Image (tube, helix red, strand yellow):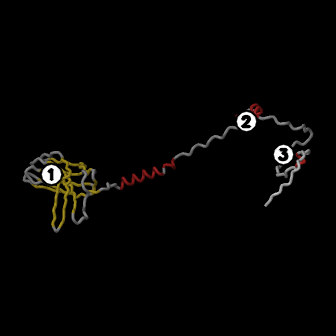
Amino acid sequence: MVGCWFFTSGPVSLSAKIERKGYCNGEAIPIYAEIENCSSRLIVPKAAIFQTQTYLASGRTKTVRHMVANVRGNHIASGSTDTWNGKTLKIPPVTPSILDCCIIRVDYSLAVYIHIPGAKKLMLELPLVIGTIPYNGFGSRNSSVASQFSMDMSWLTLTLPERPEAPPNYADVVSEEEFSRHIPPYPQPPNCEGEVCCPMFACIQEFRFQPPPLYSEVDPHPSDVEDTQPVSFIL
């Protein structure tokens, strides 16, 4: 946006722009402006955020406008120019913009203006929308997604653990002398010279349930059993 005032001594021109229209509380607005002073007066560039509250009720309208933040530049002498390359203006904690209500409306604007002694201010007003969710540009979003993707897939870059070494041979650890010292002696097989030797296996007789032995087999001389008198029961 460009504005210009003409004086008898020369014009004063101003051009200003911002990167976007929507911001949130706590964000800083970078302002890009070019000021040219061809007059004979000393001018001061300034910028401010204005809040405009509009109330509607019973067919009546009331508007309240006040400044919520401002920033000031350096003095510009006659015949000089000044440039703002991203001069920041931080947004204070304010109410978000209200644009779709039928009884109250809250608007914001960024005003870049020049204070000229003895004359009306040269002002450029840029509309603003103050929201609650910060803006994430496509570049930052892609970089965030890329970093998350690399984090999720980082397990692919992990190297597998080395294959464990094979255990040592038993003969390398235990000598024959130690082996023979811990082995109980076994009966040696008979001399089988001239015979075909074959492997020997332990034979265990299969266990089966047998009927109980007879009493006479256990005690061949049982003691005399005393005679017992018959017992009668009366029912």
Give the structural element (helix, strand or loop) at label 2.
helix
Residue placed at 15% from the left, 45% from the top? 75
Q: Nearer the viewer, residue 165 or 54?
A: 54
Distance from Cα at disc 2 to Cα at disc 3: 29 Å
Q: Is residue 84 left or right of residue 43?
A: right
* Among numbered discs 1 and 2, the one appearing first in the sequence: 1
Of mark 2 and mark 3, the one earlier in the sequence is 2
Q: Mark on residue 203?
A: 3
Q: Say which residue label 2 marks.
A: 171
Q: Alpha-carbon neighbours of circle 3 within 10 Å: few (<14), some, or many (≥20)?
A: few
Residue positioned 25% across, 56% down in the render: 95
| Disc 2 residue crowd, few under 14, some 14–19, many 20+, Cα 10 Å | few
Give the mark nearest the N terminus, 3 or 1: 1
Residue 167 locus on image (x, y percent): 66, 39
- Residue with the most extreme bottom position: 59
Q: Amino acid at mark 1?
A: Ile
Separation of residues labelled 3 and 1 (CA atoms): 116 Å
- In the rendering, which numbered label is found on residue 114? 1
- Helix, strand or loop for disc 1: strand
Say which quadrant the N terminus sits in: bottom left
Which dot, 3 or 1, sits closer to the camera? Answer: 3
Mark sitting on residue 29 = none
Which kind of residue does numbered mark 3 sit on?
A: Cys
User: Residue 208: x, y in percent?
Assistant: 82, 51
Where residue 138 appears, x then y in whole percent? 36, 56
Q: Quadrant of the C terminus?
A: bottom right
